[in-house]
Image (spheres, grey):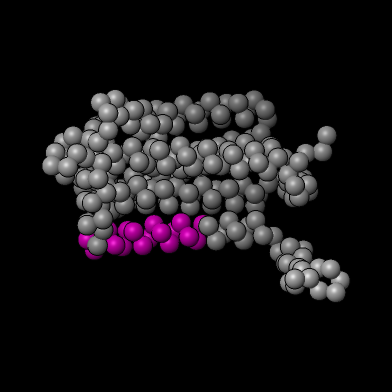
Amino acid sequence: MKDRAGARPGSGIWRWLRGHLETAPLFGLALFAGTILVFLTIAEEMREGETATFDRAVLLAFRTPGNPSDPIGPPGMEELMRDLTALGGTVTLTFLTVAVTGLVWLHGQRRSVLWLLGAVVGGQILSMLAKAGFDRPRPDLVPHGSIVETASFPSGHSMMAAITYLTLAAMAGRTESRRIVRIYLVALALLVTMAVGISRVYLGVHWPTDVIAGWAAGAGWALLCLWLAERFAPIGQRRRRRARPPGGSAAR
C-alpha cells in the first residue's frame, strides 16, 4: 500500500537510516556478536557435559549401524573426506597464505599483506590458546581416520579454514564492483569451510560441537580483522568503496 505521494509507508524512515547510519558496519557488528555468542554458549555447554548426547548422536550418524569402525558411504568416501580435510590443513593454508601474500606484495598493497598475515597468524595463535585452555579429549567412540596430536576443542581445521578462506574472499571482494561476484566469493569460502568441518566429524577426529565452535570462532575473528582493515584503510579507499553503484555494476 502506498501513501498519497506514491511512496511506501516507512520508506522515509528507511532513507533516513541509510543516510545517517552505515548499515554494513552495523550488520558486521551483529554477525561478530552472534559468532562470539555461539562460541561461548557451546564452550559453556561442552564444559558442563550438556553436549554429550548431541555429539555422540551426530558422530555415530556417520557410521554404519552396529559397526562404529565403518564409515557410511562407498569405499572411496573416506579418501574423499581426507582430501577435503586437507583443504583446512596447515600445509594447504600456509601455501595459500604465502602465495597470496607474495602476489599482494608485488602489487604494492602493503596494508593488505598486514591484514592477511594478521588474520591467519593471529587466528592460529588463538586456536592454539583455545585448545590448550579447554583441553578437550578427542572422540573415542570411533577409530580416527586421520592423525591427530592436539586437543579437540575447538576444531583447528574448521577455525583456520573459516579465517583463511573468508579473509581471502573479503580481500578479493574489495577489488570487485559487482555484488553478485562478491556474494559468490563469500559463498565459495563458506562452502569450503563447511566441507572441511564436516570431513573432520566424518573421519572421527572431532566432536560436532568442536567443529561448530571452530566455525564460529573463525568467522568471528575474520570479521574482526575485516573491520580493522576497513577501519584503518586510507580515507580515499573507503570513499571509493562506498561510492559503488547500488546495483553493484561497475561503470565502464
Residue at 25% in and 41% down:
62
Note whether residue 125 is visible.
Answer: no
Q: Is residue 65 left or right of residue 236?
A: left
How many numbered discs, if any? 0
- Between 80 and 158, the residue placed more toward the observer is 80
Q: Is residue 34 visible?
A: yes
Q: Quadrant of the N terminus?
A: bottom right
Main SS, magenta region, reads helix
Q: Residue 173 colored magenta?
A: no
Q: Quadrant of the C terminus?
A: top right
96 or 60, which lies in front? 60
Q: Give the residues drawn in magenta, as a range.
A: 32-49
Q: Position of residue 178 (x, y in %)?
A: 70, 40
On the rendered structure, is 41 left or right of 227? Answer: left
Residue depicted at x 27% and y 49%:
58
Q: Residue at x 44, y 40 (%)?
A: 193
**Relative height, residue 94 to residue 63 (above, below):** above
- Viewer-nearest residue: 221 or 129: 221
